[in-house]
Image (cartoon, rainbow, N blue to C red):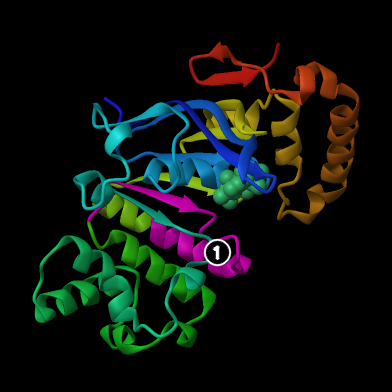
Amino acid sequence: MALLEVKNLKVYYPIKGGIMGRTVGYVKAVNDISFEINEGETIGLIGESGCGKTTTGKAILGLVPITSGSIIFNGEDITKYINKNRSSYRKSVQMIFQDVFSSMNPKERILDIIAEPLRNFEKLSKAEERKRVDELLAIVGMTPENALKYPHQFSGGQRQRIGVARALALKPKLIVCDEPVSALDLSVQAQVLNYLKDVQEEFGLSYLFISHDLGVVQHMCQKLKIMHRARFVEIGTSEEIYNNPLHIYTKRLLTAVPDMDPTNRAMNEQQRKEVEKEYESSLGSYYGEDSSVYDLKKINDDHYVAIP
Ligand SMILES: Nc1ncnc2c1ncn2[C@@H]1O[C@H](COP(=O)(O)OP(=O)(O)O)[C@@H](O)[C@H]1O
Ligand SMILES: [Mg+2]
């Protein structure tokens, strides 16, 4: 049984208009996607800005209303209860955002920031709480005296690590990582990703790892969901997607990944140009009416693509 099942999820945001503020239309942010996450697994959710990744993550956390579809956790349909506070589900699923700093109150000490979920869900004495916070800091390689500092005293990479510590406070089963390293320098990215991998192994966590960049997730994910225009254009094992991409959109994302080996640069540039040409000329054969994304067709057990 999968840890989390997302079935036919749709999230439409109402567009309000006129002086009455009536709903005049909808932004279809997520338009019928389905997937599973198993225990200990990392699923990559990849696509350009605006394709619906964050909305998908927020829907799983119960942070945006679900228009239709269902969320099933450990075999139980929890769609109706998803935004109930203090439920065990809300403990089990946490989210780390791209810019943890903006979600931190600048006037609060790291102690208070990390302890906040503990204070909401668990009754701990001050001493117990401090002990837990110190343990959580240690997990992300930080010493106890950091608990008394303020967010502005840390670098971007350190703040993301504090975000990881906070997300771990309630011993979740699943963490939605929404572009957790996108705002960081390359060298710091690797460090934060390594912490994420280490804690995953230590605590048997599952990740939904969101990124606009296929390069970042290359060594993180067992399976990938390539998202475009609120739908999945291609899904499969990482191996299938990297070695045998079939949708033009996936090919385009792949050629955008920088190659660290300078000897490949000319070849890559050539490849990028060819894919770009194919993209321009073949859009019609990859998308339906109104540029809609087709339903997924099975290529093999590990690979599905949205083609007519
Ligand atoms: N609260 C909201 N109200 C209305 N539209 C929204 C809201 N949040 C996101 N959107 C729109 O939904 C679409 C998907 O956004 P989002 O899920 O943030 O994409 P991504 O994370 O892939 O960049 C975009 O068109 C965005 O403008
Ligand atoms: Mg986003």
On the picture, is 221 further left or further right than 26? left
Residue at the image point whose x is 29% and y is 88% from the top:
145
The relative height of residue 303 versus residue 130 in the rendered view (above or below) is above
Magenta stretch encompasses residue 187: yes
Residue 295 in view, yes or no = yes
The quadrant in which residue 78 appears is top left
Residue 53 location in percent, x, y? 56, 43
Instruction: Give the crowd class for mark 1: few <14, some 14-19, many >=20 residues within 10 Å.
Output: some
Q: Does residue 178 sit above or below 27 in this rendering? A: below
The percent position of residue 273, horizontal first and vertical second, equals: 89, 39
Q: Residue at x 83, y 50 (%)?
A: 265
Question: In the image, what residue occupies the spot 73% across and 52% down?
Answer: 258
| Quadrant, the C terminus | top right
Q: On the rendered image, what quadrant is the N terminus found in? A: top left
Q: Can you say whether 285 is above or below 259 in the image? A: above
Q: Amino acid at mark 1?
A: Gln
Q: Position of residue 21 (x, y in %)?
A: 62, 46
Q: Which residue is mark 1?
A: 189
Whether ligand 2 has any atom under 8 Å from the Cβ at mark 1 is answered as no
Residue 213 visible within the image: no
Q: Is residue 294 above or below residue 137?
A: above
**72, 29: nearer the viewer:** 29
Q: Residue 16: within the magenta?
A: no
What residue is shown at x 80% (from left), y 51% (from top)? 263
Q: Is residue 256 left or right of residue 174?
A: right
**Element class at badge 1:** helix
- Specify the segment rendered in magenta: 171-196
Residue sitting nearer the eye, 153 or 8: 8
